[in-house]
Amino acid sequence: MLKPGDPAPDIQVKTDSGADFRLSDMKGKRLVLYFYPKANTPGCTTESCEFRDLSREFDRKGAVILGISPDSPKAQTGFKAKHQLPFTLLCDEDKSVAEAYGVLKEKNMYGRKVMGIQRSTFVIGPDGRIEQALYGVKSAGHAAELSARL
């Protein structure tokens, strides 16, 4: 598990628009990287819409919001449009980013054990180091709690 002071693992993925994204290209900016299990599911929609509703507050605090899940660019594009999300969504289709950040966990789904995403958020400082590592967060209220901590 990552902890404050650790370097944030660099990632290279596609965005919701299909563009290439590399975390190291964001150096110099404070990032809020939130992992969610699947677009258009109830908890993920709640969490993403709360980040949407507070996006101006995060902007004022100098934080760039980035959502990430194992969904494809097409799925992320639809999710973003449907809920008018004003920030970039990243596509971790092979779950390598989730693994690097320690959020790929064994879960029980309908009586079966599967590997899935543990809802988690990381605040990454302008120097590329983890400022906050929040594992196992709840979808409702998380964005407001995080904003208050910035």
Image (tube, grey):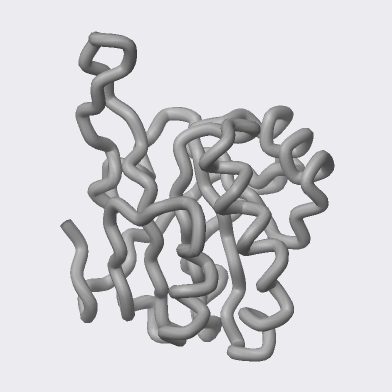
Q: Is residue 2 left or right of residue 148?
A: left
**Could you tell me which residue is drawn at 44 percent across and 49 percent down?**
35
Q: Residue furthest front?
A: 140
Give the quadrant of residue 25: bottom right
Residue 138: percent from the left, percent from the top?
39, 53
Relative height, residue 101 to residue 142 (above, below) = above
Q: Residue furthest top?
A: 111
**Could you tell me which residue is drawn at 52 percent across and 47 percent down?**
68
Locate the N terminus by quadrant.
Answer: bottom left
Residue 63: percent from the left, percent from the top?
57, 80
Relative depth, front residue between 25 and 60: 60
Relative height, residue 28 to residue 2 (above, below) = below
Residue 77: percent from the left, percent from the top?
76, 38
**Could you tell me which residue is drawn at 67 percent across and 89 percent down?**
60
Q: Is residue 71 left or right of residue 57?
A: left
Q: Is residue 20 left or right of residue 97?
A: right
Relative depth, front residue between 6 and 134: 134
Residue 10: percent from the left, percent from the top?
39, 59
**Could you tell me which residue is drawn at 38 percent across and 34 percent down?**
95
Q: How many marks?
A: 0
